[in-house]
Amino acid sequence: MAVISSASNLSKYLSLDQRGKVQVEYIWIDAFGKLRSKTKTVDQVPKEASDLSEWNFDGSSTGQAEGHDSDVIMVPVAVYNDPFRGGDNKLALCDLYNPDGTPHKDNHRHSCAKLMAAHADAKPWFGIEQEYMLFDPETNKPYGWPKHGFPGPQGKFRMAWPYYCSVGAGKIFGRDIVEAHYRACLYAGINISGVNAEVAPGQFEYQVGPCEGISMGDELWMARYLLDRVSEDFGIVVSIHPKPIKGDWNGAGCHTNVSTLEMRQEGGLAAIEKAIEKMSKRHMEHIQVYGEDNDQRLTGRHETGHIDKFSYGVANRGASIRIPRHVGKEGKGYFEDRRPASNIDPYQVTGIIMESIFSP
Ligand code: ADP
Ligand code: MN
Ligand code: MN
Ligand code: MN
Ligand code: MN
């Protein structure tokens, strides 16, 4: 039986006076790219991350440290409102350090933050489209799929595509979760820009951005945390595997939209083309940090470009990089890197994009 937290019981306790104390949820990324968190009571409402002290966790229980020297140091880097506890309570995203002060090997934020700081003048903006699929833990099948067999096909050229942006019973499964997550993001202060149901049944997307610099990685990780927590309340599991269901079903990506101040200004298309040219020369290096099992997704089918070959074009959803049609028309704006998989680390992806577009 799915474990569903009894919300009405809990709300009774959540309305009790906290007597001036604040609960802060310290959140970190584990060795497998999953999120973990634990709670600390503090005496004052933190206004920013630097108001919060460092903390630690037992790395030997998460596969992030050996037992004999198991403390991993958590340093809060971004603070958000807590939609689960409400009030003045906060969520604190942390990055990780070894006891000697060096960045922990799972801390990909550290080097990304350096790159973003070095090119802060360029005002880099990112927008990430996070695709995911909801799973029913009882059946291990996508949420809403029949117990036996498969739902009707997602569509073929000029044949019914029932699920994408769909409305109505039997076509969309999990709207409650999507809605709850959307509002939780807004409450927390995440710059979520939209949501839509995707091509496969049970598959959805939310977009976070535009976010400047390091905040892209921070906000996407926090949006993922919020979705995991919301789905937990519904007894549903979120998968960000790039090809959760084999066969003729769309995989899941994290299209990464990118611009600099120069690209957004009059005539910015030239800067966009220059950046794409630089990125094309490092295709395989990018692919290396664009998600595990991404080869199962980047087949050249299902709205993807092939993993072995770099391509780009205006309005081309079968390319590695797409220049949106309106950008081509206006001659300025941004480009979309369609290669990143749904399970990327956004710090690594935005980091290598910065490295490439600012390479000599
Ligand atoms: P698609 O047509 O590929 O499905 P979406 O509307 O899902 O596009 O997502 C577009 C993303 O691009 C959004 O996250 C949005 O915030 C982001 N975006 C818009 N303008 C810019 C820009 N100038 N620079 C970077 N990202 C941008
Ligand atoms: Mn203990
Ligand atoms: Mn989209
Ligand atoms: Mn999509
Ligand atoms: Mn897209």
Image (spheres, grey):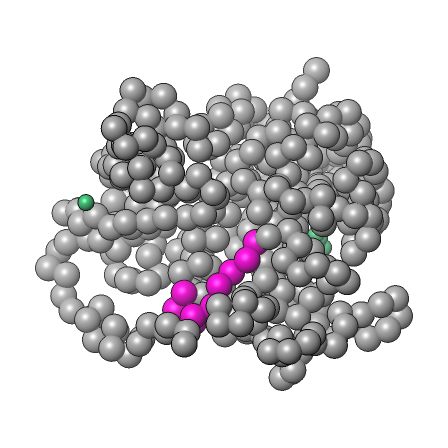
Going 72% across and 43% down the picture, which residue do you hit? 295
Q: Which residues are magenta?
A: 232-240
Going 21% across and 48% down the picture, which residue do you hit? 40
Judge left or right: residue 241 versus residue 72: right
Q: Nearer the viewer, residue 335 or 138?
A: 138
Residue 323 seen anywhere in this rendered image of the structure: no
Image height of 325 relative to 204, above or below:
above
Q: Nearer the viewer, residue 292 or 125?
A: 292
Q: Position of residue 278 (x, y in %)?
A: 75, 25
Going 64% across and 38% down the picture, which residue do you hit? 290
Q: Position of residue 301 (x, y in %)?
A: 82, 53
Image height of 344 relative to 11, above or below:
above
Judge left or right: residue 346 versus residue 91: right
Q: Nearer the viewer, residue 359 or 186?
A: 359
Q: Position of residue 131 (x, y in %)?
A: 61, 56
- Residue furthest left in the image: 19
- State the quadrant of the C terminus: top right
- Assess whether residue 124 is covered by the magenta stretch: no
Image height of 50 relative to 100, above or below:
below
Residue 187, image quadrant: bottom left
- State the quadrant of the N terminus: bottom left
Residue 58, image quadrant: top left
Going 62% across and 84% down the picture, which residue do you hit? 169
Residue 172, image quadrant: bottom right
